[in-house]
Image (cartoon, rainbow, N blue to C red):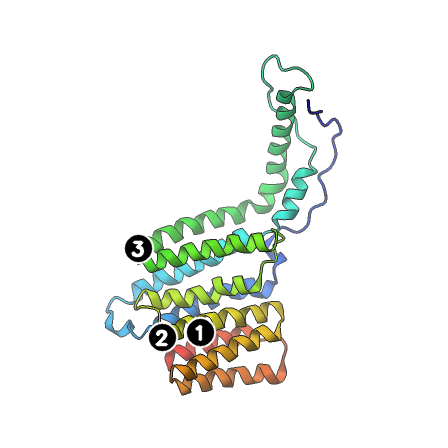
Amino acid sequence: MRSVPREAGAPAAQGDGNPAALPLAALSHAPWLASIAVMSGAIASGAVPSRPDWPLPLAMATLLALAWVALWRAVAGVDWSASLAAWWGWSEGAPVGALPYAQPGSDAVYLSHRLGQLRSWLGRDFLPRHGNLLLAGATAVAVAVVLSAALGPPAILLTIAAACIAQLAVVACRGNGRPNGLLMGATTAGLPTLLGCAIFAPISPAIALVSAAAAAAFAGVRDGSPALRHAGYALAVLTSLTAREPVAAFIWAILWAPQLILGGRHGGYGWLGAGLLLFALV
């Protein structure tokens, strides 16, 4: 038989489970960067002028990418490990009604106490801390399902990929709220670029490589890793040259040069957004 906890104590110390556990700059820049990535992918597809109704699918794709960002925040941007640690140390809460004729010290009484503690923990700790974020995540899932179904199979596959990446990020960081920068870059910059192209035309190898470059550059800025950031820009330059787009390669190089010379993280997201947009326009 399990013994029933008899001491009422305060909940265990809990870390900050808010998305602010991630670098604030990455979270604040994610929505507009994802929107620019969708627009860049659409322009780079070269098929927008042939679609008189292009504003509608482009707007839907932009909203879908924003839903991915919201889902990422709700899944990967929370310190789940701290929340679970608080639950394991939680000893407050009145027992719920036990089964009739339950004997003291029995499993039924133990379950009654644990359910009461769970109710107390949810109402006093977990939901006040994470409730709004989880509601936003659930809304993002609903929006993503509707929009991806309307946009077609490529959007559905990319939405599944975004959901899988968010879950993979949680597993990789063990739920500490500080997920891998490359995975966040894929959700914020890489997949939206592919989405913008896919709703108008098949994804070309050049656009796929540029989306990978954008993800690497984003991770380099977010994590303060010059190696990742420079690798992303180098891949973008090489991809543009391979695709016989010397003007695009020159633009990427021009945007890369100040970061090589000055270093640091300031303005990194702006350089990346400008690179994606100018790459598509040329």
Query: Crowding at label 2, few (<14), some or many (≥20) Cα neighbours within 10 Å?
Result: many
Crowd rating for badge 3 (residues with CA inside 10 Å; few <14, some 14–19, many 20+) = some
Q: Which of the 4 image quarters holds residue 41?
A: bottom left
Residue 224 lies in what quarter of the image? bottom right
Check contact, mark 1 vs mark 3: CB within 8 A.
Answer: no
Residue displayed at 45% across by 57% down: 162
Spatial CA distance of label 1 from label 3 is 26 Å
Amino acid type indicated by mark 3: Ala
What label does residue 150 carry, if any?
Answer: 3
Which residue is found at the position 31% from the left and 68% from the top? 202
Q: What label sits on residue 48 in the rendered view? A: none
Of the residues shown, which amino acid type is indicated by label 2?
Ala
User: Disc 2 to disc 1, how far (Cα)?
Assistant: 11 Å
Q: Is residue 188 left or right of residue 10?
A: left
Nearer-N-terminus badge (1/3): 3
Which numbered disc covers residue 44?
2
Labels 2, 1: front one:
1
Residues tagged 3 and 2 counted as in contact (Cβ below 8 A): no
Mark nearer the N terminus (3 vs 2): 2
Residue picked out by circle 1: 210
Q: Residue furthest top?
A: 101
Mark 1 surroundings: few (<14), some (14-19) or many (≥20) residues within 10 A: many
Q: Position of residue 61 (x, y in %)?
A: 36, 62
Give yes or no for contact between labels 2 and 1 (Cβ–Cβ under 8 Å). yes
Number of the front mark, 1 or 3: 1
Residue 40 shows in the view:
no
Q: Measuring from the top left, give residue 100's x and y in whole percent.
A: 59, 14
Question: Where does residue 106 sit, x and y in percent of width and height?
Answer: 66, 19
Q: Is residue 59 left or right of residue 162?
A: left
